[in-house]
Image: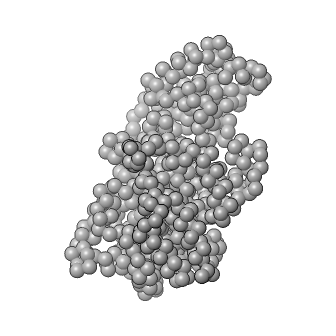
Amino acid sequence: MAYETKVLRHSLADPDDFTITFELVPGRGGHSRAIDRILTLAAEMAADRRFQAVSITENAGGHPALSPEVLGQEIHAMGLDAIIHLSCKDKNRNQMESQLFAWSREGIDNLLVIAGDYPQKGYQGCPKPVYDLDTVQALDMISALNRGVGAGGGKKSVEPTSFFKGVAVSPFKMLESEQVMQYGKLLRKVAAGADFAITQVGYDLRKFHELLVFKEQQQLAIPLLGNVFIPNMAVVELMHDGRVPGCVITDGLYSQLQWEARAADGGREARLQRAAKLLAALRGIGYDGVHIGGPGLVYADLAYVLDQAESYARDWQACIPDLSFWPQQAYYLFQKDETTGLNRHVPARPAAGKKVFAPGYFLARGVHDLAFTEQGPFYKPLRRFCLLLGGRCRNCLIYSEHVIKAVLFRCRNCGDCTLAELAFLCPQSGCAKYLLNGPCGGSRDGWCEVYPGVRRCFYVMVYERLKSCGRERDLASGYIAPRNWELNNTSSWLNFYLGRDHTARGGNCPGRRPVALSGKNEKKLL
């Protein structure tokens, strides 16, 4: 039996609607009791009519699982919209485009475009992480498909698709460097075509409100769904220890949850009540909807939360003290409104911190400005020198460049260098996910999601370097095109001067025009 429902994009576009979605997490295998329970729950939500959609994860936690579009089709047939997660971790750009064509043909239009959790152990060991595109680049590709422009060069048109593209954003970062970079990446995602955003997991209403104020000040016309996650105590332990990337259980909330767990029901009632309060408060402060999730939930739990939220709706402000779990010393983007407990529309004072001294950055920036911008005095001589060596002595040029940059920047010889855009730190060696347009959401206290306590987040280091010379705003806009693998193990200097690297394909490195060469001479050089 099919049920009538208001599709997700129409619900989010209607200011009178409060959109409610739920996250489903398929496990391994295609025929299991867990899959049957998911489908039963989806059918009950479809009948409820208060839910507009379910989102279906793709290999959540980096573990292999049933492909989300399989359940998406079955759930769509029930009359409930589905949001399919499209992650960048397991597919290169061609495979992503191929999958998008398939989903378009199958009528799957709602996407949540994410970088994805780092791949974990699979068949006979750990798989290779792909991350050929980051989320900003993937959004740009999907937006091109929606316009009917083929992603393979843009010369051949395709039948336009109609994907409705969601993204994730985290207001729950402890450090200024992490939080500012999160919001900067949101700006890039919106510019690349994001249609709506879902927050990461956290339990501080002032931080939720911070994102709303940021959206208002930046004049972003994008609906926001607040994440209402209902954990069990096993997941609470994982999140508190930082083992679920991007999800934050602070020490204060952890203590509260442990105290609540002493109850006869293990604290289940208290966790459902907190979810209901958060739902009511998110609606009260102006969110466009909520995204509910949590392990082991049944339909009765969800119905209870929605019903209880109605009882809190009239006096949602009274819920704020029960939804304030953020360390006092942690970063907020705006000053606190002591009257409401939320935020004033006034920037907070910059966080105090150790000033980064990076002489290598200033030296590299100076050399770049002298030799790799058209205004630089050494631009033309070095260009002529590279073009000369790029003929018969090409291998000598490649080797010399790689040795210099490997010593200075841990260069991986990609041939498509982005050092100038990223504070002269190399993302190919410094970022576990090779991201070019901002961080993923998994860092914690400045540490990399993949190497916590061992390697600092690449974009935290980029921000600190740029802030030390007052250039941190450089990261708030712009776009770095995907790495061109055709250039791997070639000279990035030569590719730069020839106009073959990312700066000629939509990059934001200033100050240079490509060299005009005949096809014959270009072929000889490359």
Residue 482 relative to residue 432: left or right: right
Residue name at image x 39 percent, y 34 percent: 357
Q: Is residue 179 visible?
A: no
Pinpoint residue 487: horizontal percent, then vertical percent: 61, 30
Q: Look at the picture and state if 490 lies above or below 249.
A: above
Q: Does residue 201 appear in this view?
A: yes
Vertical side of 355 occupied by 289: above or below: below
Residue 83 placement (x, y as % from top left) = 56, 65
Identify the image quadrant of the C terminus: top right
Which residue is the extreme one toward the top?
392
Residue 302 falls left or right of residue 420: left
Residue closer to the observer: 171 or 69: 69
Q: Nearer the viewer, residue 504 or 74?
A: 74
Whether residue 201 is situated above or below residue 484 in the rendered picture = below
Q: Looking at the rendering, which quadrant does residue 332 occupy?
A: bottom left
Task: Between residue 239 and residue 49, name the one nearer to us.
Answer: 49
**Location of residue 482 in the rendering, given as x and y in whole percent from the top left corner:** 60, 41
Which residue is rendered at x = 45% and y = 68% of the image?
A: 35
Q: How is the image coloured?
A: one colour
Instruction: Indicate left or right for 118 with 73 as reference.
Output: left
Res 10 quadrant in image: bottom right
Residue at x 38% of width, y 69% of height: 295
**Residue occupying the point 62% across, 41% down:** 481
Q: Nearer the viewer, residue 261 or 188?
A: 261
Question: Residue extending furthest front?
Answer: 31
Vertical placement of residue 491 versus 233, above or below: above
**Number of numbered discs on residues:** 0
Which quadrant holds the N terminus?
bottom right
